[in-house]
Image: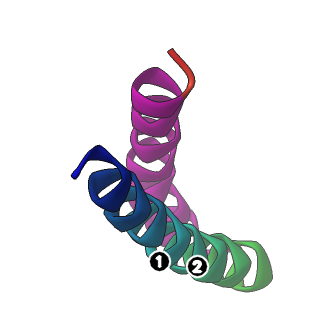
């Protein structure tokens, strides 16, 4: 049961990583200050969340 949960979490991390990479790519390419300011805090929060949950 625990292994299944871990696999599901890893799938979510993989999916979110792709989304984050896409958003970061868009932010980098378009250099839109409004978009950058809007997404940077969320991307950072997601990163911190994963570090806290999976690397503790």
Residue neighbourhood size for the residue with mark 2, other residues' Cα within 10 Å, grouped as few (<14), some (14–19), many (≥20): few
**Dot 2: element:** helix
Queried whether the magenta region covers residue 38, the answer comes back as: yes
27 relative to 33, above or below: below
Q: Are marks 2 and 1 in contact (CB under 8 Å)?
A: yes
**What span is colored magenta in the figure?**
31-54
Quick one: 33 or 47, which is closer to the camera? 47
Residue neighbourhood size for the residue with mark 1, other residues' Cα within 10 Å, grouped as few (<14), some (14–19), many (≥20): few
Q: CA distance from mark 2 to mark 1?
A: 5 Å
Residue under pointer 2:
18
31 relative to 42, above or below: below
Q: Quadrant of residue 53?
A: top left
Residue at image position (28%, 45%) is 2
Q: Position of residue 11 (x, y in %)?
A: 44, 72
Residue at image position (47%, 77%) is 15
Residue located farthest toward the right when viewing the structure as drawn = 29
């Amino acid at each position: 049961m625990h292994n299944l949960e871990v696999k599901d979490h890893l799938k979510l991390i993989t999916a979110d990583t792709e989304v984050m990479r896409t958003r970061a790519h868009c932010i980098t390419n378009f250099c839109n200050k409004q978009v950058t300011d809007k997404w940077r805090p969320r991307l950072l929060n997601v990163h911190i969340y994963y570090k806290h949950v999976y690397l503790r």
